[in-house]
Amino acid sequence: MKRSVMKIAILVLVILAACCSLCFSAGEAQVRPMLSNDDCVKCHDGPPADIASAGMKHKLITCQDCHAGHPPKVKKPIPVCSQCHQGNKHFELKGCLTCHKNPHTPLNILFPDNTTEPCLTCHDKQIVQLRENRSKHTSLSCTTCHGSVHRKKPECLKCHKPHASDMAASDCGKCHKAHMPKVIAYDDVPSKLCAACHKKAFDLLNASSAKHKTFNCSFCHQARHKMIPKCQSCHGAKHPAGIMAKFPNCYDCHKVAHDLNNWPVAPKKEQVKKIRR
Ligand code: HEC
Ligand code: HEC
Ligand code: HEC
Ligand code: HEC
Ligand code: HEC
Ligand code: HEC
Ligand code: HEC
Ligand code: HEC
Ligand code: HEC
Ligand code: HEC
Ligand code: HEC
Ligand code: HEC
């Protein structure tokens, strides 16, 4: 209380003094003292220092472009952002200063918890992915994952365990997309990533001596999870039509794709039954 009274007293004194000196020197009709932008720093050190260090494009304008007038004449010479920022969705948000904490450092941004809608004024792709591919991520807010600092991307391992201990954080993105985590798609990935959940298939293939052993799982199971290829898609009609008519199924003789070791199987009726899945 006392402090602010002091401040006002000093202010009035300074302005009076300025007045007097002006009257004396001019010696004519009263001239109003004018504050110039160079004066502000004499009494306010914070804002000028902030602008100098991180004013960004607000450096392009002056203190008085935003602060027209001064106490006591103008009680609260504080601008609203919409004086200068209008004309897009982002500028229709409420509470600009909840994120742009300090107008003198406008790009130092801190998000409040549970923010989603304001992000959408600039990022529209992610919400579409989240909503069109419903998962448990859909109901999380953007900042639950991205935190309060802009442009940060979290690692999946912040919230999840890997499928196997030798799986690295950089592997997750090979099969999952953050905003549609249940749509599992991949290009060519190392077989050990699949082995985390398919140890049996992995071991069987590895134990084989057939050429299939030299391929990654994703060479055959292409692009999306649970895709099962047809033998014919790579091999075509391998054998004479007569044989194929009698044994229409490749598995009648070749057992399984992961284990061609036991072929050729001379197919007897009972055996065929056994081999057929
Ligand atoms: C002689 C010292 C002095 C100078 C020069 C000065 N101010 Fe001030 N200013 C003050 C004081 C003291 C207050 C507090 C007045 C009050 O609270 O009523 C104040 C208040 C303000 C406020 C209002 C803060 C609020 O919370 O409402 C703004 C904005 C401001 N000044 C901006 C400026 C700008 C811009 C300049 C330069 C053009 C400037 N001042 C020059 C002393 C000064
Ligand atoms: C882009 C417009 C803009 C510019 C440029 C600007 N200000 Fe401000 N200033 C504001 C706004 C908005 C507030 C109110 C902030 C709040 O409510 O938290 C403010 C608050 C203030 C305050 C009171 C609160 C505090 O931080 O002490 C002072 C003093 C001040 N400004 C001085 C200045 C000075 C001096 C300059 C020039 C070096 C300047 N401002 C440039 C918009 C601006
Ligand atoms: C007196 C006019 C004026 C006022 C008031 C004003 N700004 Fe600005 N602001 C500008 C100008 C001019 C630019 C640079 C051109 C542009 O980006 O539009 C700018 C740029 C910005 C930028 C981008 C900075 C950069 O370097 O890219 C942000 C963020 C910003 N303003 C936020 C705010 C917020 C928040 C407020 C209200 C607290 C506000 N401004 C009030 C004039 C103003
Ligand atoms: C939820 C937080 C949030 C709110 C609320 C918010 N902003 Fe922003 N604003 C941002 C982020 C994040 C950026 C992007 C900064 C970057 O490019 O790194 C930004 C950028 C800007 C920019 C510069 C880029 C551009 O589009 O011109 C301006 C100007 C701006 N905001 C003004 C405003 C104004 C005015 C308001 C209130 C009507 C406001 N902001 C409310 C977070 C917010
Ligand atoms: C005013 C516009 C604006 C707002 C609001 C905004 N951003 Fe951004 N954001 C940008 C811009 C511009 C970039 C940098 C360009 C880019 O990579 O798209 C960016 C980048 C990002 C990045 C890094 C992108 C990358 O590829 O590295 C993330 C993550 C991000 N924003 C998340 C968010 C979140 C979460 C919110 C809300 C809490 C938000 N943004 C609000 C404009 C905005
Ligand atoms: C900030 C924490 C957080 C981060 C970061 C995160 N998640 Fe999640 N995730 C969750 C929560 C919470 C759930 C719901 C868990 C539950 O209910 O059991 C979830 C669920 C999932 C699910 C199951 C979805 C469903 O609907 O069943 C998958 C898959 C998933 N996350 C993958 C990922 C991947 C991949 C990443 C990295 C790109 C990732 N998550 C990053 C928090 C996170
Ligand atoms: C479950 C956690 C989670 C949620 C919820 C989430 N993100 Fe992300 N986001 C991530 C992860 C992890 C990445 C990094 C993905 C990568 O590197 O491929 C990312 C990447 C981004 C990027 C960079 C570009 C891109 O699309 O990869 C932007 C922008 C982004 N998120 C914005 C948002 C917005 C906006 C929301 C809310 C609508 C949101 N995110 C919700 C975890 C999340
Ligand atoms: C080789 C592909 C692949 C990689 C790499 C991968 N995932 Fe998965 N993930 C899957 C598949 C497939 C499922 C679905 C399993 C099911 O249907 O039960 C899944 C399910 C999940 C789930 C939900 C079920 C559960 O186990 O809780 C989470 C969470 C998850 N993954 C996180 C991760 C994280 C974190 C990473 C990186 C360390 C990662 N994933 C790497 C393929 C992969
Ligand atoms: C997080 C564990 C996980 C990972 C990693 C994973 N899968 Fe799966 N996979 C499953 C589950 C669970 C099923 C469903 C099993 C069932 O239906 O009996 C499945 C089913 C399959 C099926 C279909 C089986 C059928 O009978 O229709 C194929 C093919 C498959 N996975 C291949 C792969 C390939 C290739 C990879 C590596 C790119 C992989 N999986 C990575 C968990 C995983
Ligand atoms: C994605 C393609 C692909 C699929 C699907 C596929 N194969 Fe093959 N297969 C190959 C390639 C490539 C070779 C090696 C050819 C070479 O080197 O001459 C091969 C080799 C073979 C061989 C020879 C093995 C050896 O060690 O010489 C047999 C037998 C065979 N495949 C049977 C099958 C059967 C049966 C199926 C279905 C269960 C199948 N393949 C599915 C690509 C495929
Ligand atoms: C040469 C192509 C080929 C390769 C390489 C291959 N698969 Fe398969 N896989 C198939 C075919 C064809 C089937 C369906 C018929 C069968 O079982 O032979 C199948 C079936 C499966 C099934 C479902 C039936 C079962 O055996 O559980 C899973 C799971 C599977 N594969 C996972 C894998 C994994 C994991 C790898 C890598 C370690 C892998 N596959 C490598 C072609 C292949
Ligand atoms: C009646 C049993 C039988 C059936 C059914 C059968 N095969 Fe074969 N397949 C054989 C025998 C025996 C050989 C070895 C022939 C040789 O040594 O020339 C063979 C060899 C192959 C070879 C490797 C030799 C080469 O010429 O590259 C491929 C690939 C192959 N078969 C694919 C298939 C496919 C695909 C199907 C299903 C469309 C199929 N087979 C169905 C018995 C069969």
Image: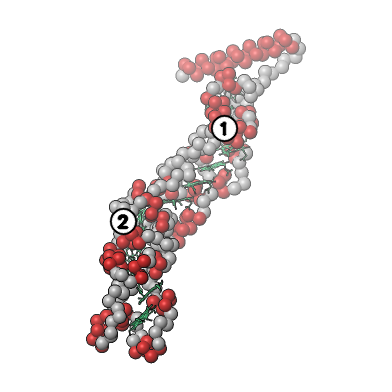
Return the mark for residue 140.
none
**Nearer to us in this view, 101 or 189:** 189
Residue at x-position 69% and y-position 18%: 32
251 up-or-down from 152: above or below? below
Label 2 beta carbon within 8 A of ligand 9: yes
**Residue identifier under label 1:** 55
Q: Position of residue 76 (x, y in %)?
A: 56, 28
Left/right of residue 20 with respect to residue 120 in the rendered view: right
Residue at x-position 41% and y-position 47%: 154
Q: Position of residue 205 (x, y in %)?
A: 30, 68
**Amino acid found under the numbered disc labelled 2:** His
Q: Residues within 10 Å of mark 1 (few under 14, many from 20)?
A: many
- First of labels 1, 2 by sequence position: 1
Residue at x-position 53% and y-position 17%: 7
Label 1 beta carbon within 8 A of ligand 2: yes
Q: Is residue 67 visible?
A: yes
**Amino acid found under the numbered disc labelled 1:** Gly
How far apart, in angstroms, are the residues tagged by discs 1 and 2?
Answer: 46 Å
**Nearer to us in this view, 113 or 267:** 267
Q: Position of residue 29 (x, y in %)?
A: 75, 14
Please identify the quarter of the rendering in which residue 210 is found: bottom left
**Residue identifier under label 2:** 163
Give the label, 1 or 2, closer to the camera: 2
116 up-or-down from 45: above or below? below
Position of the C terminus by quadrant:
bottom left
Residue at x-position 61% and y-position 44%: 86
Q: Secondary structure at mark 1?
A: loop
